[in-house]
Amino acid sequence: MRLLTHNMLSSNIKGVTNGFPLGIEVVKVVEKQVELNADFLKNMFHKIDWKGLVDGSRAMGYFELPGEPPETSALESEEFLSKFHHALLELHLEEGALVCPETGNICHFASTLRGFPS
Amino acid sequence: MMKLKQLDGLLGHLQQFSKPKVELEQYPTGHHIASRMLFTAESSFGDVSDKVVADFGCGCGTLGAAAALLGAQQVIAIDIDSESLELALLNAENLELDLDLVQCDIKNLGWRGQIVDTVVMNPPFGTRKKGADMDFLFVALQVASEAVYSLHKSSTRDHVKRAALGSFNASSAEVICELRFDLPQLYKFHKKKEVDVAVDLWRFVPKSNRGNGCF
């Protein structure tokens, strides 16, 4: 599962009011190269929850994103775009689990099937 | 953009269910229908390429694969059935496509508002479990920001339109074309060799975001 997908999901455990962002327990991360699409990134930037993305990327061992949400002007920087792109689309949680932030329970979204604890 | 014939040909090679599950109303979305559905979404409305597309109840992943082949930036394929997802993964790998798979009942999906651009789906028609297709449509219209493409039996056309515009979150609901769905004799309770069902291809446009609340 990519962090783009992670950024959209929230806990589906009954009674939870604040189920976002899901924690990530990493067993295995893989990187897959994707062609950078600047227009897509500029559009997606406004939809992304920044904290969710940063927390997720750090859990997956990537520490290049700033902790505070950057200004829109950052989108003019190629360096920033390539880091944003990498975190959002190139890091895959291949094995691991997603954890409800409120209850600490594992959410049963088996994002990748091989070796995923069900 | 890929030609319709080429898309149809690639989808024709996908593996289908070997043992479809009656309770989930699993039946494959034929490549003929899937290719036309996604080709229309892209060529007439520009709802696929460079977009985030979700395939609800993806089964063996035909619609999701079609979206990826037409240049979707990211495809999220969701199904409750792990065997379906394994098949979807296999099909995607054979076509060198990368789908993000999520195992979940569509009704119980936790979602942070309207972030996906386009939802495509061939929902259970609700023949075995009444209202199953409308459950899917309800969620799709909460999740999509630009469009929802879905197949529903033509016999339910008035009901679908009323529900989508009245109770759900649609600002428009149009039947794009009528299709014949040739269901092969998948299940024992099908008496005839082939069941020919009239099906509508719908395009719904969701109302824009009313806050970013989870549901």
Image (spheres, rainbow, N blue to C red):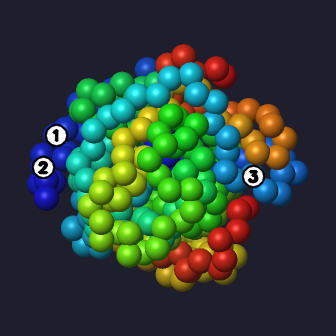
Judge the density around disc 1: few (<14), some (14-19), many (≥20) Cα neighbours within 10 Å. Answer: some
For image coordinates 40% across by 28% down, the residue present is A30
In this figure, which residue is indicated by the disc labeled 3?
A: A19
Mark 1 belongs to which amino acid?
Answer: Gly
Answer above or below: position of A52 versus B194: below
Front disc: 3 or 1: 3
For image coordinates 25% across by 53% down, the residue present is A36
In this figure, which residue is indicated by the disc labeled 1?
A: B9
Q: Quadrant of residue A110?
A: top right
Chain letter for mark 1:
B
Mark 3 belongs to which amino acid?
Answer: Gly
Location of the C terminus of chain A (image quadrant): top right
Mark 2 belongs to which amino acid?
Answer: Lys
Location of residue B184 in the rendering, given as x and y in whole percent from the top left corner: 39, 34
Q: CA distance from mark 2 to mark 3?
A: 44 Å
Looking at this view, name the residue that lies furthest to the right: A15
For image coordinates 75% across by 52% down, the residue present is A19
